[in-house]
Amino acid sequence: MKRFGVALIGSFCGLFLTWACLYALSHTQWLHRSNESIAGCHELGKCAVSWRDAVLLLAYLLGPAVLLGLVNAVAWKRWSTLKWAGWFFGITILTVALYATDYSSAAF
């Protein structure tokens, strides 16, 4: 039960990390932003989305939460604090790089 609680805390940290990255990057003033879409549609609710794209979007948004939850579940009472912190820091850096690359590539 404690392992599940620790995994849940890791998942909440991953969700917060995703929200913080997307919030901070969406409020950044980029030099040039192209508003052109390949399909010509910019809204998820009004545009048709294939099941493949929906699965990729969910993985894109929930991936860090699942990863951090799994790391916490595996690391509970098995890893040293230093090893856990290294994994947590690495996943955090990769998550920020993933979202920053996506936002910055859309600006050019």
Image (cartoon, helix red, strand yellow):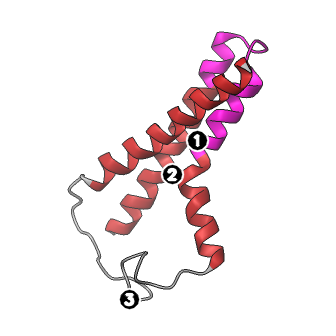
**Mark 1 — residue?**
65
Residue lying at 44% horizontally and 84% vertically, measured from the top left = 47
Residue lying at 42% horizontally and 76% vertically, measured from the top left = 45
Query: Which class describes the residues within 10 Å of circle 2: few (<14), some (14-19), or many (20+)?
Result: few
Q: Position of residue 10 (x, y in %)?
A: 59, 30
- In screen coordinates, is 5 left or right of 89? right
Magenta span: helix, strand or loop, mainly? helix
| Local secondary structure at mark 1 | helix
Point out the tag, 1 or 2, that comes first from the N-terminus. 1
Residue lying at 61% horizontally and 65% vertically, measured from the top left = 56
The answer to whether mark 1 and mark 3 are in CB contact below 8 A is no
Q: Which residues are magenta?
A: 64-86
Real-space Cα separation, disc 2 to disc 3, in angstroms: 24 Å
Look at the image and tell me in which quarter the C terminus lies: bottom left
Query: Which class describes the residues within 10 Å of circle 1: few (<14), some (14-19), or many (20+)?
Result: many
> In the rendered image of this protein, does residue 58 appear above or below residue 52?
above
Q: Is residue 79 magenta?
A: yes
In the rendered structure, find residue 98 and report the number of the disc placed on it.
2
Q: Position of residue 39 (x, y in %)?
A: 44, 88
**Mark 3 — residue?**
40
Residue closer to the observer: 30 or 21: 21
Point out the tag, 1 or 3, that comes first from the N-terminus. 3
Q: Amino acid at mark 1?
A: Ala
Query: Which class describes the residues within 10 Å of circle 3: few (<14), some (14-19), or many (20+)?
Result: few
Residue ranking furthest to the front: 1
Real-space Cα separation, disc 1 to disc 3, in angstroms: 31 Å
